[in-house]
Image (cartoon, rainbow, N blue to C red):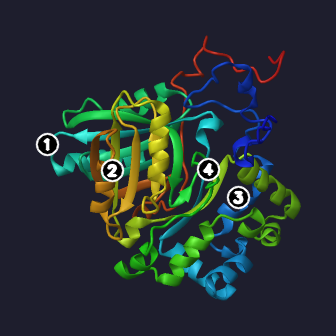
């Protein structure tokens, strides 16, 4: 019998040659929550120019995005789309951001849940909430109501920075019942957009449940259906040629069109280390997210845990899906209360025999979205400040020396 030749792995599983291949010489591939991969570029690298120029100019020049593609997709004229995008930005309903693949950039991504004791005074919760809002180490954060009170996140190279600089100042307050770390193992979806760790070839697909966009147009008065279709089209999976208008980027920046295109295509499409997207500011639309935090039985193998995460990510109504590692909990899922059949989703989760416990809370306030501040009432809209300082004081005599080059004095 003729031996069947093995098929090559699908292209989406291969990655770029300089990533992941270094692990093949080990029997068990070395892994961690933050491991700096070869081939990673700094966020100020020239290959990031298209994103960085767009991020700095879209507020007044929405045409840095490909208006030909958007006009054809949503059926509106270019000028109308530009006007609508400017209005949405001025309303603070949208913000242009990116997701870096933090685990290959050398950061561990640590989310953490906080539960306050019963009968905690509202002013005590409000005080802690303001501290979280203004703590620059926290890259993303939420105030909640339900089984837990806060859900915040830090991408940190050194976990001691999180434990001692972010958590230590308040975790022993009498109001705090517990703090549980939820390190991210896989980022499958965020802001309706599939991320680096999604299954199959769904990377960068934008997903909404059936009828959700139409219902969202009805339950609030800031965005109409054409606005929402523009947002959906802005996030749609497509080549970078159709994402940005490189002639406009060159006009704004003076940089070379082809160099910007080649750089961003490599990072987004080949290496898959950043995903640019538009975040919908749900607070402005009076929406709340129902957060389901799932704990599986501890004897469930990691492969089955990943399968369950994949199966749940196939449910389009979940706008965010993440899988945890080394935590009491295993998966978190979000869905908008106002446009989703929450009982149906809960029933689906309860049908899994592997699920031991589900905690639920409603997200009512969001502090930042990947370091971009969202508190426009304080005048900080889209301000990006992030710190991840070493605990060591590098200025003290006798401390670690910083040698820039061999033989430096």
In-image side of 370 versus 20 (left or right): left
- Residue that mark 3 sits on: 51
Q: Closer to the camera: disc 4 or disc 3?
A: 4
Q: Position of residue 63 (x, y in %)?
A: 70, 76
Q: Closer to the camera: disc 2 or disc 3?
A: 2
Q: Is residue 273 above or below residue 374?
A: above
Q: Is residue 124 above or below residue 91?
A: above
Mark 1, secondary structure of its residue: loop
Q: Which mark is residue 118?
A: 1
Q: Position of residue 134 (x, y in %)?
A: 41, 48
Closer to the chain start, of discs 1 and 3, is 3
- Residue that mark 2 sits on: 349
Mark 4, secondary structure of its residue: loop
Closer to the chain start, of discs 1 and 2, is 1
Q: Residues within 10 Å of mark 3 (few under 14, many from 20)?
A: many
Closer to the chain start, of discs 2 and 3, is 3
Residue nearest the viewer, comparing 4 with 256: 4
Q: Is residue 99 above or below residue 400?
A: below
Closer to the chain start, of discs 1 and 4, is 1
**Separation of marks 2 and 4 at Cα, in angstroms:** 22 Å
Question: Which quadrant of the figure contains the N terminus?
Answer: top right
Is any part of residue 360 visible from this angle? yes
Residue nearest the viewer, comparing 393 with 141: 141
Q: Closer to the camera: disc 1 or disc 4?
A: 4
Q: Residue furthest top?
A: 398
């Amino acid at each position: 019998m003729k031996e069947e030749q093995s098929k090559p792995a699908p292209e989406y599983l291969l990655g770029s040659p300089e990533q992941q291949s270094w692990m093949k010489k080990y029997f068990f591939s070395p892994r961690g929550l933050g491991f700096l991969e070869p081939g990673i570029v700094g966020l100020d690298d020239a290959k990031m120019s298209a994103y960085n120029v767009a991020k700095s100019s879209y507020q007044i020049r929405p045409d840095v995005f490909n208006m030909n593609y958007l006009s054809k997709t949503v059926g509106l004229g270019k000028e109308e789309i530009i006007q609508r995008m400017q209005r949405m930005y001025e309303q603070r309903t949208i913000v242009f951001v990116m997701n870096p693949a933090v685990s290959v950039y050398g950061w561990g991504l640590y989310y953490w849940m906080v539960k306050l004791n019963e009968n905690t005074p509202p002013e005590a919760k409000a005080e802690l909430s303001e501290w979280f809002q203004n703590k620059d180490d926290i890259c993303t954060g939420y105030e909640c109501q339900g089984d837990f009170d806060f859900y915040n996140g830090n991408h940190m190279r050194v976990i001691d920075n999180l434990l001692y600089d972010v958590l230590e100042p308040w975790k022993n307050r009498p109001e705090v019942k517990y703090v549980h770390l939820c390190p991210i193992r896989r980022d499958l979806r965020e802001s309706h957009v599939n991320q680096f760790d999604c299954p199959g070839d769904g990377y960068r697909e934008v997903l909404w449940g059936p009828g959700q966009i139409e219902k969202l147009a009805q339950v609030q008065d800031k965005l109409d259906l054409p606005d929402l279709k523009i947002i959906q089209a802005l996030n749609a999976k497509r080549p970078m040629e159709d994402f940005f208008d490189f002639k406009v980027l060159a006009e704004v920046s003076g940089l070379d069109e082809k160099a910007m295109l080649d750089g961003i295509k490599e990072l987004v499409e080949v290496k898959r280390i950043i995903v640019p997207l538009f975040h919908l500011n749900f607070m402005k639309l009076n929406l709340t997210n129902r957060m389901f935090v799932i704990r599986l039985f501890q004897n469930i193998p990691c492969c089955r845990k990943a399968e369950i995460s994949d199966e749940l990510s196939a449910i389009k109504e979940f706008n965010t899906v993440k899988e945890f590692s080394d935590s009491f909990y295993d998966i978190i899922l979000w869905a908008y209360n106002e446009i989703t059949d929450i009982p149906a989703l809960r029933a689906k989760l309860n049908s899994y025999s592997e699920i031991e416990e589900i905690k639920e809370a409603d997200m009512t306030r969001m502090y930042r979205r990947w370091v971009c501040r969202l508190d426009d009432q304080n005048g900080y809209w889209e301000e990006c400040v992030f710190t991840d300082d070493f605990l060591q004081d590098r200025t003290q005599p006798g401390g670690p020396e910083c040698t820039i080059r061999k033989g430096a004095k």
